[in-house]
Image: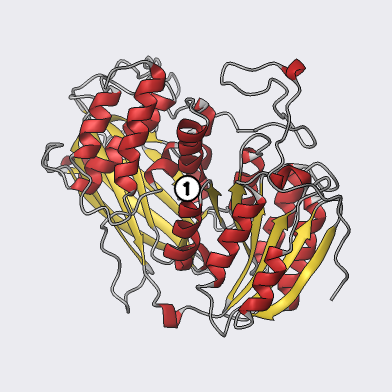
């Protein structure tokens, strides 16, 4: 075991002071907010809402699945802790929708592929002339005694910025909660990084829980953030104890402030991408706001064949690391892509709601070299499309271009004459595979109203509407926060963990902060 690196200690819980001279931006944040490596401040990649696309010009819509949930926790943190509306670019609508579990039927134990996929079309609640298509994917659950052995490396940021109570202390709580779910066939190592990186605990059987807990308890925050060196050491540790046919994963816990060493996002992306090809995947857990590099953490989790959550409370740590242990750790399919073909005889235009930074070129669908998202055991994935039926006109659609001089407009095939609204195509690879498999099925609009739709469609639509309101989206239609609250309240269902009820509280808070009556 290497000696523990020396850090400049700071008292955990000490306030992080922002100089008065910095000023505040329109969202209540310091105006020096970071724009690149080494600069403090919360960083979010800009998001431009997906626009309506004419089926005659763009019959295919292609994107990568996304099981991240970090954006929802950040929205909650903005509203409930900071008492302010979130920045529009912090709101990734697909992550809000996929934060919740839905009663989707998964595959039978012996079925292939490792997940079930289905779709349905209902009335669009915020635009009476439009329809709403939901595509639902449910991964196969893994029984606790069937989960493969795990080789985990906890990579923990112990830099000075992690000293706040909702950062390193919450990391320690969360990792101890995860430890309670591990068994005798699992192993844990702990790597920390601040001014330098160090191996605090070599790979240790999870059965030696007291040793691991003691190592976690002794961590303290101090120093600058040499995250690149920490990631390199964590991956090396994971490779040294690689378990064939097991779970090999680095779990990065950080506020995302990489300001020493390998700090550039591009170099970090290349590093985690190469390691993922070798079978070591990445989970990213973000903690605390103020100097949170959301943009970088989201990118490296995606390229690392991983998932990204934001832990703002002990309750959230329990959700991600205890209630969803298998989904967080066990990948059942990788490089999962969806491609939707719309029937021009039924649909004039469509819009994918969310997934803006997951959109792929149509050629990427059949390209097995193109990276895409992963699905964990038991994960549910939802995607929504707003559809403009033939004969209806959406004001938000861009003007039609003139007919081409040198090419003729494609003509519908005989298949367009049937009642199909769209066809869903899905590609995926086994976690250790290089060749994708294809699933394909048609979907027909049965004319179902929104009120007659199942509660999961209605609740997902309410979450999407909430996201559009927070983003000040031009596509939010006629819905108000009161409409969002009503739709969600009527679709709460059993709600065993109170997450849907909590969502309604967030809607009320956002309405209050925006000055809109519910």
Residue at 70% across / 16% down in the picture?
23
Secondary structure beneath label 1:
loop
Residue 296 is left or right of residue 436, and the answer is: right
Observer-nearest residue: 217 or 97? 217
Q: Position of residue 275 (x, y in %)?
A: 70, 63
At which x and y percent is residue 400?
37, 17
Q: So how many labels did they put on this image?
A: 1
- Give the camera-side residue of 168 and 305: 168
Residue 318 against residue 498 in the figure, above or below: below
Q: Quadrant of residue 247?
A: bottom right
Q: Does residue 484 appear in this view?
A: yes
Q: Which residue does the numbered mark 1 point to in the structure image?
A: 69
Relative to 484, say whether 285 is above or below: below
Relative to 479, does residue 421 appear above or below in the rendering?
Answer: below
* Residue count near mark 1 (Cα–Cα under 10 Å), binned few <14, some 14–19, many ≥20: many
Q: Give residue 124's quadrant in the image.
A: top left
Give the image location of residue 497, x and y in percent: 33, 55
What residue appears at the point 53 percent right and 81 percent down from the top-left corner?
183
- Residue ID at (72%, 35%): 16
Which quadrant is home to the N terminus? bottom right
Residue in the foreground of this view, choosing between 336 and 91 = 91
Residue 469 is left or right of residue 287, and the answer is left
């Amino acid at each position: 075991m290497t000696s523990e690196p020396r850090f400049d200690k700071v008292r955990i819980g000490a306030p992080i002071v922002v100089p008065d001279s910095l000023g505040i931006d329109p969202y209540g944040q310091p105006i020096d907010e970071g724009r690149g490596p080494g600069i403090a401040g919360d960083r979010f990649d800009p998001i431009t809402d997906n626009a309506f696309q004419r089926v005659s010009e763009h019959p295919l819509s292609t994107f990568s699945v996304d099981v991240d949930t970090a954006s929802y926790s950040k929205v909650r943190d903005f509203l409930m802790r900071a008492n302010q509306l979130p920045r529009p670019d912090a709101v990734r609508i697909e992550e809000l929708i996929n934060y919740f579990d839905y009663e989707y039927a998964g595959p039978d134990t012996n079925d292939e592929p490792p997940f079930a996929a289905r779709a349905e079309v209902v009335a669009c609640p915020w635009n009476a002339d439009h329809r709403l298509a939901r595509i639902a994917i449910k991964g196969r659950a893994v029984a606790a005694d069937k989960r493969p052995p795990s080789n985990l490396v906890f990579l923990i940021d112990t830099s000075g910025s992690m000293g706040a109570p909702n950062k390193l202390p919450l990391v320690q709580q969360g990792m101890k909660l995860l430890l309670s779910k591990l068994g005798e066939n699992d192993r844990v190592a702990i790597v920390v990084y601040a001014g330098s990186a160090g191996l605090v605990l070599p790979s240790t059987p999870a059965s030696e829980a007291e040793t691991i807990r003691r190592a976690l308890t002794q961590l303290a925050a101090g120093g600058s953030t040499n995250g690149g060196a920490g990631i390199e050491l964590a991956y090396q540790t994971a490779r040294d104890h690689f378990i064939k046919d097991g779970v090999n994963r680095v779990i990065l816990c950080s506020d995302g402030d990489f300001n020493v060493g390998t700090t550039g996002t591009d170099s970090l992306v290349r590093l985690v991408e190469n390691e993922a090809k070798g079978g070591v995947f990445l989970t990213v857990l973000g903690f605390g706001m103020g100097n949170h590099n959301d943009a970088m953490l989201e990118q490296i989790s995606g390229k690392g064949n991983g998932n990204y959550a934001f832990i703002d409370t002990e309750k959230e740590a329990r959700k991600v690391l205890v209630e969803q242990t298998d989904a967080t750790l066990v990948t059942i399919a990788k490089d999962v892509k969806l491609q939707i073909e719309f029937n021009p005889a039924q649909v004039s235009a469509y819009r994918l709601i969310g997934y803006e930074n997951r959109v792929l070129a149509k050629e990427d669908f059949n390209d097995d070299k193109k990276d895409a998202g992963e699905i964990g055991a038991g994960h549910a994935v939802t995607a929504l499309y707003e559809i403009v039926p033939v004969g209806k006109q959406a004001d938000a659609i861009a003007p039609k271009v003139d007919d081409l001089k040198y090419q003729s407009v494609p003509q519908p095939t005989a298949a367009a004459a049937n009642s199909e609204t769209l066809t869903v195509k899905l590609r995926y690879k086994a976690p250790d595979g290089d060749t994708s498999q294809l699933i394909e099925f048609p979907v027909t609009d049965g004319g179902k109203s929104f009120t007659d739709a199942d509660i999961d469609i209605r609740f997902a639509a309410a979450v999407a509407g909430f996201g559009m309101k927070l983003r000040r989206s031009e596509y939010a239609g006629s819905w108000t926060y009161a409409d969002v609250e009503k739709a969600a309240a009527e679709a709460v269902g059993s709600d065993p963990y109170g997450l849907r009820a909590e969502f309604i509280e967030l809607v009320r808070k956002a309405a209050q902060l925006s000055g809109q009556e519910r």
